[in-house]
Amino acid sequence: MLRKKIIIGNWKMNKPPSKAKILTKALSFAVPEDREVVICPPFVSLDVVKKMLKGRKIKLGAQNMYFEESGAYTGEISALMLSEMGVSHVLVGHSERRAIFHETNKEINKKLKIALEYKFTPVFCVGESLEEREGHMTEKVIERQLREGLDGLKKSDVLKMVIAYEPVWAIGSGQTATAKQAVEVHKHIRAFLSRLYDKELSEEIRIIYGGSVKPDNVDELMSKPDIDGVLPGGASLDAAKFTRIVGFKAK
Ligand code: 13P
């Protein structure tokens, strides 16, 4: 089963519409046939980016979403709203959402369910903190995030997702996990999903890596068969760097 490589740029809370326009314009590369490219601007820039991507193969993603469809939830954005904006992917459970906004596995589970209902591709983010890694808790923490996040979801639902392994200590720190460290966790995620669902699912699902992905480490990460893509943050804000990442050369 061929797992198509996917590169997702998470702009985080950067690029208001005026700047989003400039950055999108500078992403003038053609998306290679063998890979999928998604960019996730902040909510307020989705519209302008969508218009600029017309006729191009770059897909549009959102960075978050609330799990209710409408109502008295001041400040929140629903799946219904995002579907009208032409979004195809949505990040769910990013570590910044978990740490800064106290998102729980239960809420993440609800978000994954509503994202699937609206036919988005959920990009389900998991990862351990430095403290957890140093305490040899990485596998336990990720297993719990997966078990609780995927609670009640069928195999056919999970197969529509992308799992993103983002070790918290590697995000924005310049300290990338080594390809070996990333592969170890990706393999563990596959083994765990094989137990939770089955072997077929574990072989078909895409697992991508995020955390200080840059032009100078992307080729090595992408050369690993267990790494199906990358999720750069900072480097996706620089057109030349993002273009280089999209054009990774896997050995
Ligand atoms: P950096 O690439 O800036 O470390 O961010 C990674 C990330 O959090 C992507 O979602």
Image (tube, rainbow, N blue to C red):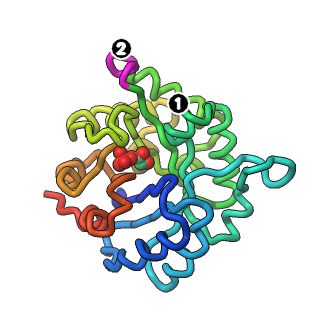
Q: Are marks 2 and 1 in contact (CB under 8 Å)?
A: no
Report the residue that reaches farthest toward the bottom. 55
Taking the magenta stretch, the answer to whether it contains residue 131 is: yes
Query: Going by the image, does 18 lie left or right of 200?
Result: right
Q: Residue at x 40, y 50 (%)?
A: 206
- In the rendered image, the vertical position of residue 207 relative to residue 191, given as above or below: below
Give the residue at mark 2: 135
Quarter occupied by residue 106: top right
Q: Residue at x 52, y 45 (%)?
A: 124
User: Can you see residue 207?
Assistant: no
Q: Residue at x 63, y 41 (%)?
A: 153
Residue 145: % across, % down: 53, 30
First in sequence, mark 2 or 1: give its number. Answer: 2
Give the residue at mark 1: 145
Report the residue that reaches farthest toward the right. 72
Q: Which residues are magenta?
A: 130-137
The prevailing secondary structure element of the residues shown in magenta is helix
Q: Which secondary structure lies at badge 2?
A: loop
